[in-house]
Image (cartoon, rainbow, N blue to C red):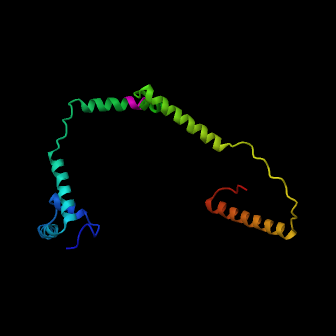
Amino acid sequence: MNCPIQDHNSEILVAYTAGQLDQETAQELGRHLAGCAPCRSMAAEQAAVWKALDAWEAPAVSPDFDRRLCRRIEQGARLSWWERLVRPFRSMPLRQAFPLTASAGLLLTAALLLQHPGSIVPAKPRGDLVRANQVEKTLDDLDLLRQFSAADSAESGHPHVM
């Protein structure tokens, strides 16, 4: 048998420890585990997980659980959007709420400053000569871009925006 870990087939080890493999495959994997320390270690860890899950007992559900759940759902449905937004922060102590609010304010301020930086000073015009063939090439490029834009608008079904 090929090593399940090297073949990236660790699911077979999980199935082995869960007792979900047929007898022949389980025996073959058992022989492999006798000689492969990494697989044996993973199988032992998975067996410990299954043992812990078998030992765990779910807490009993209270008799009025359904009634309380339905009432809480109804109360949540009646809340306004603002109350739903503020609800998670009501139980937060003021000591925790202040730094959180200050951080949010700083982030908002930074976003606004990055969005609208100070006025941009135009560059001084240089005395370079513009050649007629450069202007003609630029106009041809703009015309080509308009054609692409018109083709995109026609394909998407939106009216021409340019």
Q: Is 162 situated above or below 134?
A: above
Q: Could you tell me if residue 82 is visible in this image?
A: no
**For the point 56% across and 39% down, which residue is it?**
107
**For the point 17% across and 44% down, which residue is it?**
56
Q: Which residues are magenta?
A: 75-79
Q: Could you tell me if residue 38 is visible in this image?
A: yes
Residue 74 % position (x, y): 37, 30
Say which of 2 and 127 sits in front.
127
Total numbered circles: 0
Q: Is residue 115 left or right of residue 124?
A: left
Say which of 24 and 96 sits in front.
96
Magenta stretch: includes residue 78 = yes
**Image quarter in which the N terminus is found:** bottom left
User: Residue 150 sits in which quadrant?
Assistant: bottom right
Q: Is 54 situated above or below 43?
A: above
Residue 3 % position (x, y): 23, 70
**For the point 21% across and 31% down, which residue is it?**
62
Magenta stretch: includes residue 124 = no
Q: Is residue 40 left or right of residue 144?
A: left
**Image quarter in which the C terminus is found:** bottom right
Say which of 73 and 121 sits in front.
121
